[in-house]
Amino acid sequence: MSLNQTKSETTWLLAALGILILVSFFAGLSLIPLFDVDEGAFSEATREMMVSKNYLTTYLNGAPRFDKPILIYWLQFASVKLFGLNEFAFRFPSAAAGAAWAASIFWFVRKESGNRQAFLAATMMVLSLQVMVIAKAAIADGVLNCLLAMTMFALLHHYKNSSKTALHLAFATVGLGTLTKGPIAIIIPFVATFLFALLEGRVKQWLKMIFNPTGILLFLIIALPWYLLEYRDQGMNFINGFFFKHNINRFNSSLEGHSGSLFYYLPVILIGMMPFSGFFLTVLFKLKTLIADSTNRFLLIWFSFVFIFFSLSGTKLPHYMIYGYTPLFILMARALPLTKHPERFALWPLILLAMLTLLPLLLQKAMHDISDTYIQALLVGAMELTGQTYLVVVIAAITGIVVIQFLPRFSVEGKLIATGLIFSLFINFYLTPLAGRLMQEPVKQAALLAKKEGYKIVMWKTYNPSFLVYFESFVEKRDPKPGEIVLTTVKQLDQLNHPTILYSKYGIVMAKLNQ
Protein backbone atom coordinates (compact mmCIF):
# COMPACT_ATOMS: atom_id res chain seq x y z
CA MET A 1 0.00 0.00 0.00
CA SER A 2 1.40 3.42 -1.00
CA LEU A 3 1.92 6.26 1.46
CA ASN A 4 -1.04 8.20 0.01
CA GLN A 5 -3.28 5.15 0.29
CA THR A 6 -2.20 4.65 3.91
CA LYS A 7 -2.96 8.29 4.73
CA SER A 8 -6.34 8.03 3.03
CA GLU A 9 -7.17 4.85 4.94
CA THR A 10 -6.11 6.48 8.22
CA THR A 11 -8.33 9.48 7.50
CA TRP A 12 -11.37 7.32 6.74
CA LEU A 13 -10.85 5.12 9.78
CA LEU A 14 -10.41 8.12 12.08
CA ALA A 15 -13.59 9.64 10.65
CA ALA A 16 -15.46 6.37 11.29
CA LEU A 17 -14.03 6.20 14.81
CA GLY A 18 -15.12 9.79 15.40
CA ILE A 19 -18.70 8.96 14.39
CA LEU A 20 -18.75 5.96 16.74
CA ILE A 21 -17.41 8.17 19.56
CA LEU A 22 -20.14 10.74 18.94
CA VAL A 23 -22.81 8.03 19.06
CA SER A 24 -21.41 6.16 22.05
CA PHE A 25 -20.06 8.97 24.25
CA PHE A 26 -21.61 12.33 23.34
CA ALA A 27 -25.07 11.84 21.84
CA GLY A 28 -26.75 10.71 25.04
CA LEU A 29 -25.13 13.03 27.57
CA SER A 30 -28.26 15.05 28.28
CA LEU A 31 -30.86 12.28 27.93
CA ILE A 32 -30.70 11.05 31.52
CA PRO A 33 -30.80 12.76 34.94
CA LEU A 34 -27.64 12.53 37.03
CA PHE A 35 -27.33 9.16 38.76
CA ASP A 36 -26.87 8.89 42.50
CA VAL A 37 -24.69 8.59 44.35
CA ASP A 38 -21.50 9.39 42.45
CA GLU A 39 -22.68 11.60 39.59
CA GLY A 40 -24.84 13.60 41.97
CA ALA A 41 -22.00 14.05 44.46
CA PHE A 42 -19.38 15.15 41.91
CA SER A 43 -21.79 17.51 40.16
CA GLU A 44 -23.06 19.07 43.36
CA ALA A 45 -19.51 19.64 44.61
CA THR A 46 -18.78 21.46 41.35
CA ARG A 47 -21.97 23.52 41.66
CA GLU A 48 -21.03 24.53 45.19
CA MET A 49 -17.56 25.49 43.93
CA MET A 50 -19.23 27.87 41.48
CA VAL A 51 -21.38 29.41 44.21
CA SER A 52 -18.66 29.71 46.87
CA LYS A 53 -15.87 30.65 44.43
CA ASN A 54 -13.59 28.40 46.49
CA TYR A 55 -11.54 26.67 43.78
CA LEU A 56 -9.25 24.84 46.19
CA THR A 57 -11.42 22.73 48.50
CA THR A 58 -14.57 20.94 47.36
CA TYR A 59 -17.71 20.82 49.49
CA LEU A 60 -20.85 18.70 49.36
CA ASN A 61 -23.95 20.09 51.05
CA GLY A 62 -21.66 22.56 52.78
CA ALA A 63 -19.28 19.94 54.26
CA PRO A 64 -15.72 19.34 52.95
CA ARG A 65 -15.52 16.49 50.42
CA PHE A 66 -12.16 14.73 50.39
CA ASP A 67 -13.10 11.80 48.16
CA LYS A 68 -11.10 12.90 45.09
CA PRO A 69 -8.51 15.53 44.13
CA ILE A 70 -9.39 18.71 42.32
CA LEU A 71 -8.90 18.25 38.55
CA ILE A 72 -12.29 16.72 37.68
CA TYR A 73 -14.05 19.57 39.50
CA TRP A 74 -12.04 22.18 37.60
CA LEU A 75 -12.90 20.46 34.32
CA GLN A 76 -16.59 20.27 35.21
CA PHE A 77 -16.50 23.90 36.34
CA ALA A 78 -15.08 24.99 32.97
CA SER A 79 -17.65 22.86 31.15
CA VAL A 80 -20.57 24.33 33.12
CA LYS A 81 -19.28 27.83 32.41
CA LEU A 82 -19.30 26.94 28.71
CA PHE A 83 -22.53 24.92 28.41
CA GLY A 84 -24.58 25.95 31.45
CA LEU A 85 -25.73 24.07 34.54
CA ASN A 86 -27.03 20.83 33.01
CA GLU A 87 -26.28 17.13 32.61
CA PHE A 88 -24.43 17.62 29.31
CA ALA A 89 -21.97 20.03 30.92
CA PHE A 90 -21.27 17.86 33.97
CA ARG A 91 -20.65 14.81 31.76
CA PHE A 92 -18.77 16.50 28.93
CA PRO A 93 -15.27 16.21 30.50
CA SER A 94 -15.67 12.44 30.78
CA ALA A 95 -16.86 12.13 27.18
CA ALA A 96 -13.97 14.29 25.95
CA ALA A 97 -11.55 12.18 27.96
CA GLY A 98 -13.14 9.05 26.48
CA ALA A 99 -12.54 10.42 22.99
CA ALA A 100 -8.88 11.16 23.82
CA TRP A 101 -8.58 7.69 25.39
CA ALA A 102 -9.84 6.05 22.17
CA ALA A 103 -7.52 8.23 20.06
CA SER A 104 -4.53 7.21 22.19
CA ILE A 105 -5.35 3.53 21.66
CA PHE A 106 -5.62 4.10 17.90
CA TRP A 107 -2.31 6.00 17.83
CA PHE A 108 -0.45 3.38 19.86
CA VAL A 109 -1.75 0.31 17.99
CA ARG A 110 -1.31 1.98 14.61
CA LYS A 111 2.39 2.45 15.35
CA GLU A 112 2.67 -1.16 16.47
CA SER A 113 0.38 -3.06 14.10
CA GLY A 114 -1.18 -0.80 11.48
CA ASN A 115 -4.47 0.95 10.81
CA ARG A 116 -6.92 -1.96 10.77
CA GLN A 117 -5.91 -3.42 14.12
CA ALA A 118 -5.77 0.08 15.61
CA PHE A 119 -9.32 0.78 14.47
CA LEU A 120 -10.58 -2.55 15.83
CA ALA A 121 -8.95 -2.05 19.26
CA ALA A 122 -10.24 1.52 19.59
CA THR A 123 -13.71 0.55 18.35
CA MET A 124 -14.03 -2.28 20.87
CA MET A 125 -13.13 0.20 23.57
CA VAL A 126 -15.69 2.77 22.35
CA LEU A 127 -18.54 0.25 22.01
CA SER A 128 -17.98 -1.90 25.12
CA LEU A 129 -20.62 -1.71 27.83
CA GLN A 130 -18.64 -0.52 30.83
CA VAL A 131 -16.64 2.06 28.89
CA MET A 132 -19.84 3.46 27.38
CA VAL A 133 -21.11 3.98 30.92
CA ILE A 134 -17.92 5.45 32.38
CA ALA A 135 -17.28 7.79 29.43
CA LYS A 136 -20.67 9.43 30.01
CA ALA A 137 -20.53 9.55 33.80
CA ALA A 138 -19.91 12.82 35.62
CA ILE A 139 -17.14 11.28 37.75
CA ALA A 140 -13.34 11.16 37.70
CA ASP A 141 -12.76 7.72 36.18
CA GLY A 142 -13.09 8.60 32.51
CA VAL A 143 -10.36 11.23 32.86
CA LEU A 144 -8.15 8.91 34.91
CA ASN A 145 -8.42 6.07 32.37
CA CYS A 146 -7.44 8.41 29.56
CA LEU A 147 -4.40 9.62 31.50
CA LEU A 148 -3.41 6.08 32.52
CA ALA A 149 -3.52 4.93 28.89
CA MET A 150 -1.37 7.87 27.77
CA THR A 151 1.09 7.23 30.60
CA MET A 152 1.55 3.54 29.85
CA PHE A 153 1.82 4.04 26.10
CA ALA A 154 4.42 6.77 26.60
CA LEU A 155 6.44 4.59 28.99
CA LEU A 156 6.47 1.64 26.58
CA HIS A 157 7.49 4.00 23.76
CA HIS A 158 10.33 5.22 25.94
CA TYR A 159 11.39 1.62 26.69
CA LYS A 160 11.58 0.85 22.99
CA ASN A 161 13.05 4.08 21.64
CA SER A 162 14.64 5.87 24.63
CA SER A 163 12.47 8.86 23.79
CA LYS A 164 12.90 11.67 26.30
CA THR A 165 9.76 13.34 25.01
CA ALA A 166 7.71 10.21 25.69
CA LEU A 167 9.20 9.90 29.18
CA HIS A 168 8.43 13.51 30.04
CA LEU A 169 4.90 13.06 28.68
CA ALA A 170 4.47 10.08 31.01
CA PHE A 171 5.52 12.09 34.06
CA ALA A 172 3.15 14.88 33.04
CA THR A 173 0.18 12.55 32.65
CA VAL A 174 0.99 10.85 35.96
CA GLY A 175 0.93 14.31 37.53
CA LEU A 176 -2.46 15.05 35.99
CA GLY A 177 -3.70 11.60 37.03
CA THR A 178 -2.58 12.28 40.60
CA LEU A 179 -4.64 15.48 40.47
CA THR A 180 -7.58 13.43 39.17
CA LYS A 181 -7.76 10.48 41.54
CA GLY A 182 -4.66 10.37 43.69
CA PRO A 183 -1.99 7.71 44.31
CA ILE A 184 -3.50 5.07 42.00
CA ALA A 185 -2.24 7.12 39.03
CA ILE A 186 1.28 6.51 40.36
CA ILE A 187 0.90 2.94 41.63
CA ILE A 188 -0.28 1.30 38.38
CA PRO A 189 2.48 2.68 36.09
CA PHE A 190 5.15 2.28 38.78
CA VAL A 191 4.45 -1.37 39.62
CA ALA A 192 3.48 -2.55 36.13
CA THR A 193 6.60 -1.10 34.50
CA PHE A 194 8.81 -2.47 37.29
CA LEU A 195 7.40 -5.98 36.80
CA PHE A 196 7.92 -5.67 33.05
CA ALA A 197 11.49 -4.45 33.53
CA LEU A 198 12.15 -7.30 35.96
CA LEU A 199 10.82 -9.85 33.46
CA GLU A 200 12.82 -8.34 30.61
CA GLY A 201 16.03 -7.96 32.65
CA ARG A 202 16.01 -4.17 32.29
CA VAL A 203 15.77 -3.00 35.89
CA LYS A 204 18.69 -0.56 35.50
CA GLN A 205 16.84 1.13 32.64
CA TRP A 206 13.72 1.24 34.80
CA LEU A 207 15.58 2.90 37.67
CA LYS A 208 17.04 5.47 35.31
CA MET A 209 13.57 6.13 33.94
CA ILE A 210 11.88 6.47 37.33
CA PHE A 211 14.53 8.79 38.75
CA ASN A 212 14.68 11.07 35.73
CA PRO A 213 15.22 14.56 37.25
CA THR A 214 13.34 16.48 34.57
CA GLY A 215 10.41 14.08 34.76
CA ILE A 216 10.22 14.26 38.55
CA LEU A 217 10.35 18.07 38.43
CA LEU A 218 7.57 18.11 35.84
CA PHE A 219 5.44 15.80 37.98
CA LEU A 220 5.97 17.94 41.08
CA ILE A 221 5.16 21.18 39.24
CA ILE A 222 1.85 19.72 38.09
CA ALA A 223 0.69 17.71 41.12
CA LEU A 224 2.32 19.11 44.24
CA PRO A 225 0.97 22.69 44.51
CA TRP A 226 -2.67 21.69 45.00
CA TYR A 227 -1.81 19.04 47.61
CA LEU A 228 0.31 21.52 49.58
CA LEU A 229 -2.32 24.26 49.38
CA GLU A 230 -5.09 21.83 50.33
CA TYR A 231 -3.11 20.65 53.36
CA ARG A 232 -2.46 24.26 54.32
CA ASP A 233 -6.20 24.98 54.02
CA GLN A 234 -7.61 21.84 55.69
CA GLY A 235 -4.71 20.38 57.71
CA MET A 236 -5.04 16.85 59.06
CA ASN A 237 -8.69 16.68 58.02
CA PHE A 238 -7.42 16.44 54.43
CA ILE A 239 -4.78 13.84 55.30
CA ASN A 240 -7.24 11.70 57.25
CA GLY A 241 -10.11 12.15 54.82
CA PHE A 242 -8.29 11.74 51.52
CA PHE A 243 -5.19 9.61 52.12
CA PHE A 244 -6.36 7.42 54.98
CA LYS A 245 -10.12 7.03 54.45
CA HIS A 246 -10.42 7.17 50.66
CA ASN A 247 -7.12 5.51 49.71
CA ILE A 248 -5.51 3.34 52.40
CA ASN A 249 -8.78 2.27 54.02
CA ARG A 250 -10.31 1.43 50.64
CA PHE A 251 -7.61 -1.17 50.16
CA ASN A 252 -7.47 -2.45 53.73
CA SER A 253 -11.20 -2.71 54.39
CA SER A 254 -14.62 -2.72 52.76
CA LEU A 255 -15.65 0.93 52.54
CA GLU A 256 -19.37 1.74 52.43
CA GLY A 257 -20.22 -1.97 52.14
CA HIS A 258 -18.53 -2.45 48.74
CA SER A 259 -16.95 -5.86 49.24
CA GLY A 260 -16.66 -9.10 47.26
CA SER A 261 -14.76 -12.35 46.83
CA LEU A 262 -11.41 -12.85 45.06
CA PHE A 263 -13.39 -13.73 41.93
CA TYR A 264 -15.52 -10.57 42.04
CA TYR A 265 -14.00 -9.08 38.89
CA LEU A 266 -14.39 -12.09 36.59
CA PRO A 267 -18.12 -11.54 35.97
CA VAL A 268 -17.44 -7.79 35.95
CA ILE A 269 -15.09 -8.24 32.98
CA LEU A 270 -17.40 -10.62 31.12
CA ILE A 271 -20.35 -8.23 31.45
CA GLY A 272 -18.35 -5.00 31.24
CA MET A 273 -16.69 -5.93 27.93
CA MET A 274 -19.98 -6.82 26.22
CA PRO A 275 -20.49 -7.35 23.32
CA PHE A 276 -16.83 -8.39 22.89
CA SER A 277 -16.50 -10.60 25.99
CA GLY A 278 -15.67 -13.71 23.96
CA PHE A 279 -12.35 -12.22 22.92
CA PHE A 280 -11.30 -11.95 26.55
CA LEU A 281 -11.50 -15.74 26.75
CA THR A 282 -9.49 -15.99 23.52
CA VAL A 283 -6.76 -13.90 25.13
CA LEU A 284 -6.71 -16.31 28.09
CA PHE A 285 -6.63 -19.40 25.87
CA LYS A 286 -3.92 -17.98 23.58
CA LEU A 287 -1.59 -16.65 26.29
CA LYS A 288 1.26 -18.93 25.25
CA THR A 289 1.22 -17.48 21.74
CA LEU A 290 0.65 -13.89 22.81
CA ILE A 291 3.45 -13.69 25.38
CA ALA A 292 6.05 -14.40 22.70
CA ASP A 293 5.81 -10.69 21.83
CA SER A 294 7.32 -8.14 24.25
CA THR A 295 4.53 -5.59 23.72
CA ASN A 296 1.97 -8.25 24.57
CA ARG A 297 3.93 -9.08 27.72
CA PHE A 298 3.81 -5.43 28.74
CA LEU A 299 0.04 -5.31 28.12
CA LEU A 300 -0.56 -8.57 30.01
CA ILE A 301 1.45 -7.38 33.02
CA TRP A 302 -0.50 -4.11 33.02
CA PHE A 303 -3.86 -5.90 33.03
CA SER A 304 -2.75 -8.63 35.47
CA PHE A 305 -1.50 -6.16 38.05
CA VAL A 306 -4.76 -4.20 37.97
CA PHE A 307 -6.78 -7.42 38.25
CA ILE A 308 -4.75 -8.83 41.16
CA PHE A 309 -4.38 -5.51 43.01
CA PHE A 310 -8.09 -4.74 43.06
CA SER A 311 -9.06 -8.37 43.66
CA LEU A 312 -7.02 -8.18 46.87
CA SER A 313 -8.49 -4.80 47.82
CA GLY A 314 -11.05 -4.74 50.61
CA THR A 315 -13.26 -2.28 48.73
CA LYS A 316 -14.45 -3.59 45.37
CA LEU A 317 -16.32 -1.51 42.80
CA PRO A 318 -16.98 -2.56 39.19
CA HIS A 319 -15.34 0.49 37.61
CA TYR A 320 -11.97 -0.23 39.24
CA MET A 321 -11.36 -2.95 36.65
CA ILE A 322 -11.58 -0.44 33.80
CA TYR A 323 -8.05 0.68 34.74
CA GLY A 324 -6.92 -2.60 33.17
CA TYR A 325 -9.24 -2.59 30.15
CA THR A 326 -6.99 -0.63 27.77
CA PRO A 327 -4.42 -3.43 27.40
CA LEU A 328 -7.25 -5.95 27.07
CA PHE A 329 -8.79 -4.16 24.09
CA ILE A 330 -5.42 -4.19 22.33
CA LEU A 331 -4.78 -7.84 23.17
CA MET A 332 -8.28 -8.76 22.01
CA ALA A 333 -7.67 -7.06 18.66
CA ARG A 334 -4.37 -8.92 18.37
CA ALA A 335 -6.06 -12.20 19.27
CA LEU A 336 -8.62 -11.97 16.46
CA PRO A 337 -6.37 -13.68 13.86
CA LEU A 338 -5.84 -16.53 16.36
CA THR A 339 -9.58 -17.15 16.67
CA LYS A 340 -11.00 -20.05 14.63
CA HIS A 341 -14.68 -19.13 14.89
CA PRO A 342 -15.00 -15.39 15.71
CA GLU A 343 -18.62 -15.39 14.50
CA ARG A 344 -19.56 -17.40 17.58
CA PHE A 345 -18.74 -14.46 19.82
CA ALA A 346 -22.02 -12.83 18.80
CA LEU A 347 -23.59 -15.35 21.18
CA TRP A 348 -22.40 -13.29 24.17
CA PRO A 349 -24.50 -10.16 23.53
CA LEU A 350 -27.35 -12.34 22.25
CA ILE A 351 -27.42 -14.26 25.53
CA LEU A 352 -27.47 -11.02 27.52
CA LEU A 353 -30.26 -9.58 25.38
CA ALA A 354 -32.21 -12.85 25.62
CA MET A 355 -31.94 -12.63 29.41
CA LEU A 356 -33.31 -9.09 29.25
CA THR A 357 -36.45 -10.38 27.54
CA LEU A 358 -37.13 -12.29 30.75
CA LEU A 359 -36.95 -9.14 32.87
CA PRO A 360 -40.74 -8.51 33.02
CA LEU A 361 -41.30 -12.04 34.33
CA LEU A 362 -38.51 -11.69 36.87
CA LEU A 363 -39.95 -8.39 38.10
CA GLN A 364 -43.36 -9.99 38.66
CA LYS A 365 -41.78 -12.83 40.62
CA ALA A 366 -39.74 -10.39 42.72
CA MET A 367 -42.91 -8.50 43.66
CA HIS A 368 -44.14 -11.60 45.50
CA ASP A 369 -40.79 -12.32 47.18
CA ILE A 370 -39.76 -8.85 48.43
CA SER A 371 -41.52 -7.09 51.30
CA ASP A 372 -39.49 -3.83 51.36
CA THR A 373 -42.00 -1.14 50.33
CA TYR A 374 -39.38 1.06 48.63
CA ILE A 375 -38.11 -1.87 46.52
CA GLN A 376 -41.71 -2.78 45.74
CA ALA A 377 -42.34 0.75 44.48
CA LEU A 378 -39.29 0.48 42.24
CA LEU A 379 -40.49 -2.88 40.95
CA VAL A 380 -43.91 -1.44 40.13
CA GLY A 381 -42.22 1.37 38.22
CA ALA A 382 -39.95 -1.08 36.43
CA MET A 383 -42.96 -3.15 35.35
CA GLU A 384 -44.61 0.01 33.99
CA LEU A 385 -41.52 0.79 31.93
CA THR A 386 -40.91 -2.73 30.61
CA GLY A 387 -44.14 -3.41 28.81
CA GLN A 388 -44.75 -4.34 25.18
CA THR A 389 -42.54 -1.59 23.74
CA TYR A 390 -39.64 -2.82 25.84
CA LEU A 391 -39.94 -6.35 24.45
CA VAL A 392 -40.22 -5.06 20.88
CA VAL A 393 -37.02 -3.02 21.24
CA VAL A 394 -35.03 -5.88 22.82
CA ILE A 395 -36.21 -8.35 20.17
CA ALA A 396 -35.35 -5.83 17.43
CA ALA A 397 -31.79 -5.58 18.82
CA ILE A 398 -31.51 -9.38 18.88
CA THR A 399 -32.81 -9.62 15.31
CA GLY A 400 -30.39 -6.98 14.06
CA ILE A 401 -27.38 -8.76 15.56
CA VAL A 402 -28.49 -12.13 14.17
CA VAL A 403 -29.06 -10.72 10.67
CA ILE A 404 -25.60 -9.14 10.63
CA GLN A 405 -23.96 -12.51 11.19
CA PHE A 406 -25.44 -13.79 7.91
CA LEU A 407 -24.48 -10.88 5.66
CA PRO A 408 -22.00 -12.40 3.18
CA ARG A 409 -20.16 -9.22 2.20
CA PHE A 410 -19.31 -8.20 5.77
CA SER A 411 -15.81 -9.04 7.00
CA VAL A 412 -15.32 -10.54 10.44
CA GLU A 413 -14.23 -7.13 11.72
CA GLY A 414 -17.22 -5.49 10.05
CA LYS A 415 -19.65 -7.87 11.74
CA LEU A 416 -18.03 -7.26 15.11
CA ILE A 417 -18.26 -3.50 14.74
CA ALA A 418 -21.84 -3.60 13.44
CA THR A 419 -22.81 -5.85 16.37
CA GLY A 420 -21.17 -3.41 18.76
CA LEU A 421 -22.96 -0.46 17.16
CA ILE A 422 -26.40 -2.08 17.55
CA PHE A 423 -25.55 -2.96 21.14
CA SER A 424 -24.38 0.59 21.79
CA LEU A 425 -27.54 2.12 20.34
CA PHE A 426 -29.68 -0.16 22.50
CA ILE A 427 -27.78 0.63 25.69
CA ASN A 428 -27.31 4.36 25.11
CA PHE A 429 -30.66 5.35 23.69
CA TYR A 430 -33.04 2.89 25.31
CA LEU A 431 -31.88 0.84 28.29
CA THR A 432 -29.89 3.52 30.16
CA PRO A 433 -32.60 6.20 29.70
CA LEU A 434 -35.10 3.64 30.97
CA ALA A 435 -33.00 3.16 34.11
CA GLY A 436 -32.74 6.93 34.47
CA ARG A 437 -36.51 7.35 34.29
CA LEU A 438 -36.94 4.76 37.02
CA MET A 439 -34.12 5.64 39.40
CA GLN A 440 -33.41 9.34 38.94
CA GLU A 441 -36.26 11.15 37.24
CA PRO A 442 -38.34 11.19 40.46
CA VAL A 443 -35.44 12.79 42.35
CA LYS A 444 -35.01 15.43 39.66
CA GLN A 445 -38.74 16.20 39.47
CA ALA A 446 -39.00 16.49 43.25
CA ALA A 447 -36.02 18.85 43.34
CA LEU A 448 -37.41 21.06 40.56
CA LEU A 449 -40.77 21.25 42.35
CA ALA A 450 -39.06 22.15 45.64
CA LYS A 451 -37.02 24.83 43.88
CA LYS A 452 -40.08 26.29 42.14
CA GLU A 453 -42.10 26.45 45.37
CA GLY A 454 -39.21 27.67 47.50
CA TYR A 455 -39.40 24.79 49.97
CA LYS A 456 -36.88 24.25 52.74
CA ILE A 457 -36.03 20.55 52.60
CA VAL A 458 -34.94 18.00 55.19
CA MET A 459 -33.43 14.85 53.62
CA TRP A 460 -34.19 11.88 55.85
CA LYS A 461 -33.13 8.23 55.53
CA THR A 462 -32.19 8.63 51.87
CA TYR A 463 -29.10 9.99 50.17
CA ASN A 464 -29.63 11.66 46.80
CA PRO A 465 -26.98 14.32 46.19
CA SER A 466 -28.36 14.87 42.68
CA PHE A 467 -31.38 16.47 44.40
CA LEU A 468 -29.06 19.27 45.54
CA VAL A 469 -27.88 19.91 41.98
CA TYR A 470 -31.41 20.43 40.65
CA PHE A 471 -32.62 22.14 43.85
CA GLU A 472 -29.58 24.46 43.67
CA SER A 473 -29.40 24.76 47.43
CA PHE A 474 -28.47 22.86 50.57
CA VAL A 475 -30.69 20.49 52.53
CA GLU A 476 -30.51 19.45 56.15
CA LYS A 477 -29.86 15.77 56.85
CA ARG A 478 -31.57 14.95 60.13
CA ASP A 479 -34.86 13.78 61.64
CA PRO A 480 -37.70 16.03 60.43
CA LYS A 481 -39.82 18.11 62.79
CA PRO A 482 -43.58 18.88 62.65
CA GLY A 483 -44.44 21.31 59.86
CA GLU A 484 -41.24 20.65 57.87
CA ILE A 485 -40.96 19.27 54.35
CA VAL A 486 -39.03 16.05 54.07
CA LEU A 487 -37.49 14.15 51.16
CA THR A 488 -37.51 10.45 51.93
CA THR A 489 -38.72 7.13 50.54
CA VAL A 490 -42.11 5.47 50.71
CA LYS A 491 -40.60 3.00 53.17
CA GLN A 492 -40.46 5.71 55.86
CA LEU A 493 -44.01 7.06 55.51
CA ASP A 494 -45.41 4.96 58.35
CA GLN A 495 -43.12 6.82 60.75
CA LEU A 496 -44.37 10.27 59.69
CA ASN A 497 -47.96 10.21 61.02
CA HIS A 498 -49.93 10.68 57.79
CA PRO A 499 -48.07 13.64 56.24
CA THR A 500 -49.34 15.64 53.26
CA ILE A 501 -47.78 14.15 50.12
CA LEU A 502 -46.38 16.86 47.86
CA TYR A 503 -44.71 14.51 45.38
CA SER A 504 -44.42 10.74 45.04
CA LYS A 505 -43.07 8.56 42.26
CA TYR A 506 -41.28 5.21 42.14
CA GLY A 507 -40.62 5.20 45.88
CA ILE A 508 -39.30 8.77 46.20
CA VAL A 509 -41.54 10.92 48.40
CA MET A 510 -41.57 14.61 49.28
CA ALA A 511 -44.05 15.29 52.08
CA LYS A 512 -45.02 17.97 54.58
CA LEU A 513 -45.34 16.82 58.18
CA ASN A 514 -48.39 17.73 60.22
CA GLN A 515 -47.97 20.44 62.85
Image: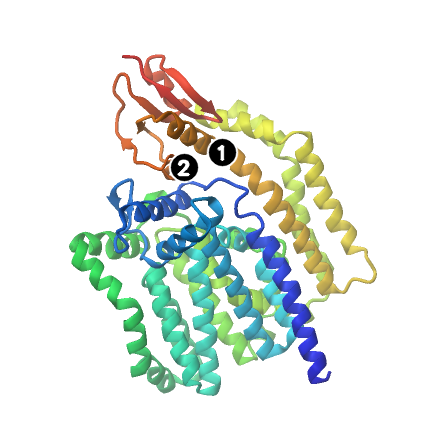
Q: Residue at x 25, y 53 (%)?
A: 57
In the image: residue 44, left or right of residue 430: left
Query: Dot 1, crowdedness within 10 Å: few (<14), some or many (≥20)?
Result: many
Q: Which mark is residue 441?
A: 1
Image coords of residue 215 (percent x, y): 33, 79
Q: Earlier in the sequence, mark 2 or mark 1?
A: 1
Query: Dot 2, crowdedness within 10 Å: few (<14), some or many (≥20)?
Result: many
Q: Residue at x 39, y 70 (%)?
A: 173
Give the amino acid type for the residue marked by disc 2 in the picture: Tyr
Q: Is there CB contact under 8 Å for labels 2 and 1?
A: no
Image coords of residue 450 (percent x, y): 38, 27
Residue 292 lies, with reference to residue 241, above or below; the image says below
Instruction: Please name whichever residue, 413 or 312, is drawn nearer the observer in this view of the structure.
Output: 413
- SS state under label 2: helix
Residue for badge 2: 470
The quarter of the rendered structure image containing the N terminus is bottom right
Image coords of residue 139 (percent x, y): 42, 51
Image coords of residue 38 (percent x, y): 40, 45
Q: Residue at x 69, y 30 (%)?
A: 388
- SS state under label 1: helix
Residue 366 lies, with reference to residue 24, above or below; the image says above
